[in-house]
Amino acid sequence: MVQLVWFKRDLRHTDHRPLVEAAASGPIIPLYVAEPGYWGQPDTSRRQYLAVASALAELSLRLEQLGAPLIVRTGTVIECLGRIHRAVGLTRILAHQETGNAWSFARDRAVRRFCQEAGITFVEYPQFGVVRGLRDRDEWGVLSGKILRAPPLPEPARLIAATQAPPGNIPSPEQLGLVEEACDQPQSGTRHAALALLDSFFAGRGAHYRRAMSSPLAGADACSRLSVSLSTGAISIREALAACYAARNGRAAVPLTAIDSLISRLHWHCHFIQKLESEPQMEHRSVHPAHERARVATADNDPTLLAWASGRTGYPFADACMRSLIATGWLNFRMRAMVTSFAVHHLGLDWRACGLHLARLFTDYEPGIHWPQVQMQSGQTGINTPRIYNPVKQGLDQDPTGAFTRRWIPELADMPLALLQTPWLAGSGYVAPVIDPSQGIRDARSRLSKVRAEPGYWAASQAVFQKHGSRTRTFENDHPARNRAIKTEKTAMAKRQLALEF
């Protein structure tokens, strides 16, 4: 029996079920295929590949130490598998399921057809707490929980190579057609980096996680920063969760609330990926049919899109966030939501065009999180409260000292703090706002109200909720924590009022 383990976005040797299962059955061929077709897609970028390449180099070294070097090839997966099959006669291919973009979905279907026609057994295992084939969310919590609660699998004690073929080289970005870009702070996607980040988080870096995660400045240090290694698959969700539980039961130097918040975020990761798994078309069309009908495509050369994409809209805080993202490949969650909301609601841009640009900028691009989030933050779902973030208010709230804005907008280094987020009031030489701030909000609300007033809108929203909504929440209640706080405050007010009456 000749087995092949196909590595995709799961570049690790621990908690890797295909590798463990294959190693227990005999000799294996570990394979990774660098696919020019994938890296030519409009949502991919050089910064993403550099993170993948770093994880590949680390994985290759470890597999060689275990006894079976990683075979790296460049081309299409079907061609590579065909050549290997003709040379050695494959009997079984093992891999993780991938919830990726439309291109990778189509590629995986092609591999299944190839295996069926060639008489090769193709075995796929869940990669996250994501369940393939679900019709709705009713059973997802239970099924996902079984996956995530299982202990991480140890790496195989040893591997036996099934071929003496040369390992091959990891291609350079240029060999895949990936051009230079303005990312001067690349992020590693390795396992070593992920484990170091977890250690430092529990050792004290995450002490102010809950408070700092909303700040683009403080969040860069206080957040877990695991997202790049999770996107390359150098560490699994189960491993990260296991580390959290161990820290929670041990003597971590951070509050339990910080650890619990990180645990919640890791579960949230799978919750969103399940959405794209259940509806891959989410990458291309609005989840809610009424919003899809109302969509107006934005041209690639649209001046407003280009101004937003380059951080030159005239709104300092929004521009600072975009310039920071361009340079670092990372932005905290709240600011990701804000730049998306600002683009679609204030500027009237199409979510798909904005989503593609952001995807390329995010080193940690995870399609299953990215596209559901873009749709949610741009008000396309019909089941989430539309959030129209005011970039001026966000700048005042999240950058109260102006340090972040001044760092990324040096043109405003000398602007008084009181006018930093509204430099047009000072008649400065900074870029004039591309839209009137008040009019932009009014136009956004008008567009949303018109769509939501369509006949059948709420019935369609119910159908979306049945397919994608969290079962820990009720329809039209996507802020349970806030609602609990409001209820608590009302109860306290009632008690105070009762005391006054007496």
Image: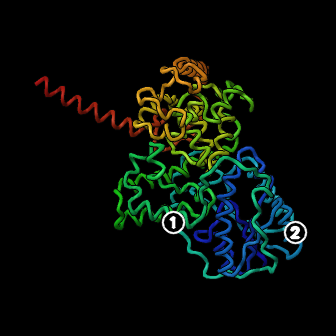
- Residue 458 bears which disc, if any? none
Dot 1: element? helix
Q: Which residue is mark 2?
A: 83
Say if 176 sits above or below 280 in the image. Answer: below
Amino acid of disc 1: Leu
Dot 2: element? helix
Instruction: Tell me whether the residue at label 1 lies in contact with that at label 2, contact meaning CB atoms closer than 8 angstroms.
Output: no
Residue at 52% across / 39% down in the picture? 335
Q: Quadrant of the C terminus?
A: top left
Amino acid of disc 2: Arg
Q: Is residue 341 visible?
A: yes
Residue at 81% across / 76% down in the picture? 166
Residue at 71% across / 68% down in the picture? 94
Q: Quadrant of the N terminus?
A: bottom right
Q: Where is residue 333? Give x, y as percent.
A: 51, 44
Q: Which residue is mark 1?
A: 195
Residue at 88% across / 75% down in the picture? 87
In front here: 468 or 413?
A: 413
> Badge 2: few (under 14), some or many (20 or more) residues near its Cα, within 10 Å?
few
Looking at the image, is mark 1 or mark 2 earlier in the sequence?
A: 2
Q: Where is residue 184? Give x, y as percent.
A: 62, 51
Dividing the picture into quadrants, the one containing residue 108 is bottom right
In front here: 240 or 57?
A: 57
Q: Where is residue 392? Give x, y as percent.
A: 48, 28
C-alpha span from label 1 to label 2: 37 Å
Q: Could you tell whether 274 is left or right of 476 in the image?
A: right
